[in-house]
Amino acid sequence: MKSSRSDLPVEFAEALDRARPRLGRLAGDVRYYESIASTNDIAAQLAAAGEREGIVVIADTQTAGRGRRGHTWFSPPASGLYVSVVLAPARARITPDRAVALLTLSAGVALVEAIERATGLNADLKWPNDLYVGRRKLAGILAEAIEAQQVVLGYGINVGRMAYPLELSERATALEVELGRAIDRPALFAETLVAMARRYDDLLTGRFDAILDGWRARSPGCRGTRVSWTSAAGPRSGVTAGIDDHGALLVQAGETIERIVAGELTWH
């Protein structure tokens, strides 16, 4: 089932048109679906078929949305933003490996900025890929490498009130819950792409400090928070000590600083 820019609901198309001068290299082609398994899967298929960097896939609902490490992403109809963008950070002009490593963090900064601009709500970033309000998750990011040095960057934002599954009811929140009013989803969608385009341009042109400074300023938990995890040597714990210049989480564990680049952390 193929969709195109012309299939976007009118209000979404109009919001994109208003934002067009600020979208840069993104969203020249937008594919809309009422219901699909996963926007990341469709975006990966499009990239494999030769579609270029900047193509956007958006769905009204996902039947098999997912997050990091096999977690599912609850994606009910008309209640959130479920979006994927094809990017190519490996073609950055300066230290492309670093640009790839910072992609997820740059997306987190972009989403926080977009949400603040569109709604006024200030969210916090939680390493490596989540947005929180207090102790409840508001949004998540999933970056998946595909062929030809491209990456599919997917993100989900909880917008409207929804009946969460029991296992999520105490851990998730939404913009309308936090703000107590209706949110303009099309305007928010456009602002997320505008912010993504700006931060993606930072990656491609080597403005890494702007991304790192933005992330550190919006992640109070990246310093002074107790965390635990399982390493090859067994259970470990420590206190967060910031992130390094490649986006790895630093943890003070006893007399040493551990550098964590992947894995599942428990935040206490």
Image (cartoon, helix red, strand yellow):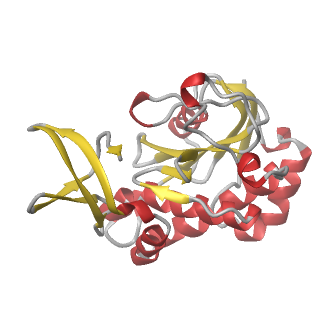
Which quadrant holds the N terminus?
top right
Q: Nearer the viewer, residue 112 or 201?
A: 112
Q: Is residue 181 above or below residue 81?
A: below
Q: Is residue 58 above or below residue 189?
A: above
| Quadrant in the picture for residue 61 | top right
Please give left or right for residue 54 compared with residue 10 in the image.
Answer: left
Residue at 77% in and 65% down: 20
Q: Is residue 102 above or below residue 46?
A: below
Please give left or right for residue 11 compared with residue 48 in the image.
Answer: right
Q: Is residue 111 above or below residue 203?
A: above
Residue at 67% in and 25% down: 36
For residue 194, say whether it is visible.
no
| Quadrant in the picture for residue 51 | top right
Residue 135 x, y percent position in the rendering: 52, 48
Residue 259 x, y percent position in the rendering: 20, 57
Q: Nearer the viewer, residue 191 or 125?
A: 125
Residue 249 x, y percent position in the rendering: 29, 58
